[in-house]
Amino acid sequence: MTDCVFCTIIAGDAEADVVLDEPHLVAFLDRRPVFKGHVLLVPREHHVTLPDLPADQRDGFLAAAQRLAAAVVDGLGAQGSFVAMNNVVSQSVPHLHLHVVPRTKGDGLRGFFWPRRTYDDGESAEYAARLRAALGS
């Protein structure tokens, strides 16, 4: 879909800090992270919600989410992660995406209020590289 920002990232027509690039999936840093290292996992094919994801892609999608949850701990030193997905309501981009947010005790995240942050120049590339390294181990 040409009007979907995630499809343009997948096609290589928009910049993103990619941390995982597989035949059916791509994961990249959220441009407005809850915490630095916040990753979005998306299927390459355009599907709007989780119920739309074909059954033969579910296991690979969840396996990648598990690996990303481990990578934010191993690569970024987080104590854990928050993994979430919206379906239509509060889904800012209508392309299935799963959030993997690094967490540490006392980080201030409460409930579903997600304050957003920004990266300094070059900082997002460093976070992406650290996550790619953790995924490779």
Image (spheres, helix red, strand yellow):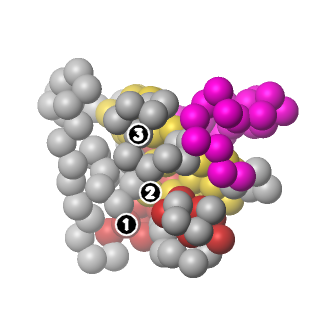
Q: Identify residue for label 3.
A: 91
Along the viewing direction, whichever of 54 and 16 lies nearer the viewer: 54
The label number, if any, that marks residue 124 in the structure image: 1
- Circle 2 SS class: strand
Q: Does the rendering let one see residue 29?
A: yes
Q: Would you identify the image quadrant in which residue 132 lies?
A: bottom right
Q: Does the rendering let one see residue 81?
A: no
Numbered disc in front, either 2 or 3? 3
Residue at the spot 69% in from the left edge and 54% down from the top edge: 44
The label number, if any, that marks residue 29 in the structure image: 2
Q: Would you identify the image quadrant in which residue 91 lies?
A: top left
Mark 2 vs mark 3, CA separation in Å: 17 Å
- For the residue carrying disc 2, how many other residues have a C-alpha within 10 Å: few (<14), some (14-19), or many (20+)? many
Assign the magenta stretch its main secondary structure: helix
Amino acid type assigned to the residue bearing label 1 in the image: Ser
- For the residue carrying disc 1, how many other residues have a C-alpha within 10 Å: few (<14), some (14-19), or many (20+)? many
Along the viewing direction, whichever of 57 and 70 lies nearer the viewer: 57
Whole-percent x, y for residue 39 in the image: 46, 48
Whole-percent x, y for residue 110 in the image: 19, 24
Residue stretch rendered in magenta on the structure? 45-70
Mark 1 vs mark 3, CA separation in Å: 23 Å
Mark 2 vs mark 1, CA separation in Å: 7 Å
| Marked residue nearer the N-terminal end (2 or 3) | 2
- Taking the magenta stretch, the answer to whether it contains residue 114 is no
Above or below for 112 versus 114: above
State the count of labels: 3
Along the viewing direction, whichever of 106 and 31 lies nearer the viewer: 31
